[in-house]
Image: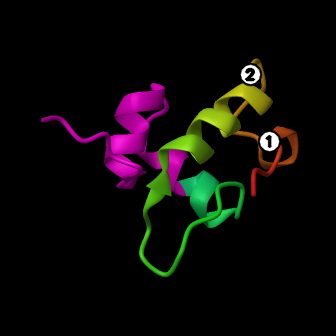
Amino acid sequence: MSVAKIGMTIEEAAEMSGIGRNPMRALVDWGKLKVGRKTIIRTDTLERFMTVNQGRNLRCRDEVKEVV
């Protein structure tokens, strides 16, 4: 039986989204992707983030919309 993961590391989230690891780390550091004490990104949060920020320059902090 296969179990779907609900949380990913920065590396896994970067691979799933197509965003590089360094930009993904920057998004976490900027608080644009909310995480707990350990950096785990919820799958549903990443999907919502990608939808809200479609077509935006993810390397420009001011253009990226926060997802809670």
Tell me which residue sits at (42%, 76%) in the image. Answer: 38
Classify residue 65 by image quadrant: top right
Q: Position of residue 10 (x, y in %)?
A: 40, 52
Residue corresponding to mark 2: 54
Does 68 appear above or below 56?
A: below
Q: Position of residue 22 (x, y in %)?
A: 46, 47
Q: Disc 2 marks which amino acid?
A: Gln
Q: Is 61 in front, or is 35?
A: 35
Task: Quadrant for the C terminus, please.
Answer: bottom right
Q: Which residues are magenta?
A: 1-25
Tell me which residue sits at (24%, 41%) in the image. Answer: 3
Q: Is 61 in front, or is 33?
A: 33
**Residue 19 visible to an observer of this rendering:** yes
Does 65 appear above or below 34?
A: above
Query: In what element is the residue under mark 2?
Result: loop
Query: In what element is the residue under mark 1?
Result: loop
Q: Disc 1 marks which amino acid?
A: Val
Classify residue 26 by image quadrant: bottom right
Residue corresponding to mark 1: 64
Q: Is 57 in front, or is 6?
A: 6
Nearer the observer: mark 1 or 2; the answer is 2
